[in-house]
Image (tube, rainbow, N blue to C red):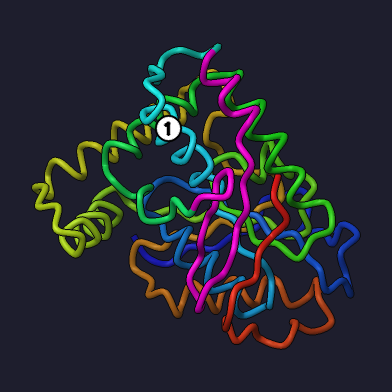
């Protein structure tokens, strides 16, 4: 599929309240493998904003649940666990880092099994309610790029600028497959694509916060676009909402977003 970018009829595209504002709140939603994390991080660096991966919160909860022997289907216990989690998002030497209850769990969250656990937790209403509240606590002052699957629809429906990134399952599967290969996880490409299709179905049909295009979001099909091309489209959409970007963050040292 060729490059596709279009405006939905409501919201940020009509200039709701953010013009001339430096500390924008930007949301990026979309299915797995559409490029959300790569582009959210790059956009945050470019604008001098903080980057929040909402999915990392679900993965962290799944990780700690497994460590504590809590079943990923035990909604009551998981909700209680999430209530007591304290998240802090940092940039260390240009790379995103997440601390949970003071512990760096960044490199433990990308395992395939933890992703599966996060998907299960995402279907539980009690868990989502707690984590959505914690996500909202991170964003009232703006200056944030947050990515996920329900950020522009549920967490911040009134965000200054909203994006929805999409791509064909085959394109997303190739990207995910290459990522797994780099991490030494030799999973067949066909299996990766099949898992993505199943996850798409689960995300779009779940009863709680299903994946959908936010009202007012800019829709971008990334199937046949490079990262640079998608990034340029996103910057063009953001420029009218900000007099100028912050001085680009050199990403040196450690910058932490307050814990929640």
19 shown above or below 199? below
> Would you say 238 lies left or right of 183 here?
right
**Quadrant where the image shows the N terminus:** bottom left
Q: Is residue 89 magenta?
A: yes
Instruction: Give the number of marks.
Output: 1
Q: Residue at x 36, y 28 (%)?
A: 66
Q: Residue at x 46, y 78 (%)?
A: 229
Q: Position of residue 111 (x, y in %)?
A: 28, 46
Q: Nearer the viewer, residue 58 or 66?
A: 66
Q: Position of residue 127 (x, y in %)?
A: 58, 24
50 shown above or below 155? below
Tell me which corner region of the image, top left, top right, bottom left or bottom right, holds residue 224: bottom left
> Would you say 92 lies left or right of 146 here?
left
Label 1's element? helix
Q: Position of residue 97 (x, y in %)?
A: 51, 61
75 shown above or below 16? above
Q: Is residue 218 magenta?
A: no
Q: Which residue is mark 1?
A: 62
Tell me which corner region of the image, top left, top right, bottom left or bottom right, holds residue 152: top right
24 shown above or below 168? below
Circle 1 residues within 10 Å: few <14, some 14–19, many ≥20: many
Which residues, given as a range, are shown in magenta?
A: 77-103
Q: Residue at x 76, y 52 (%)?
A: 139
**Quadrant where the image shows the C terminus:** top right
Q: Position of residue 78 (x, y in %)?
A: 52, 20
Q: Residue at x 69, y 60 (%)?
A: 257
């Amino acid at each position: 599929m060729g490059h596709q970018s279009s405006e939905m009829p409501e919201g940020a595209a009509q200039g709701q309240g953010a013009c001339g504002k430096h500390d924008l709140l930007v949301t990026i939603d979309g299915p797995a493998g559409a490029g959300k994390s790569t582009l959210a991080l790059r956009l945050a660096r470019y604008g001098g904003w903080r980057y929040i991966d909402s999915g990392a919160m679900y993965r962290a909860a799944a990780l700690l649940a497994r460590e504590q022997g809590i079943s990923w289907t035990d909604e009551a216990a998981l909700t209680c666990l999430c209530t007591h989690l304290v998240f802090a998002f940092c940039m260390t030497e240009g790379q995103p880092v997440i601390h949970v209850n003071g512990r760096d769990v960044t490199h433990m969250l990308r395992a395939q099994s933890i992703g599966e656990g996060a998907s299960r937790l995402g279907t539980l209403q009690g868990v989502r309610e707690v984590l959505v509240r914690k996500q909202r606590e991170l964003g009232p002052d703006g200056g944030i790029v947050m990515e996920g699957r329900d950020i522009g629809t549920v967490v911040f429906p009134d965000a200054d600028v909203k994006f929805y990134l999409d791509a064909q399952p085959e394109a997303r599967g190739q990207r995910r497959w290459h990522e797994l290969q780099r991490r030494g996880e030799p999973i067949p490409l066909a299996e990766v694509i099949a898992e993505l299709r199943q996850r798409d179905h689960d995300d779009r049909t779940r009863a709680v916060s299903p994946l959908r295009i936010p009202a007012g979001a800019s829709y971008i099909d990334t199937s046949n676009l490079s990262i640079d091309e998608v990034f340029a489209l996103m910057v063009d959409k953001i420029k009218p909402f900000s007099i100028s970007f912050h001085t680009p963050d050199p990403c040196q040292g450690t910058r932490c977003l307050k814990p929640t």
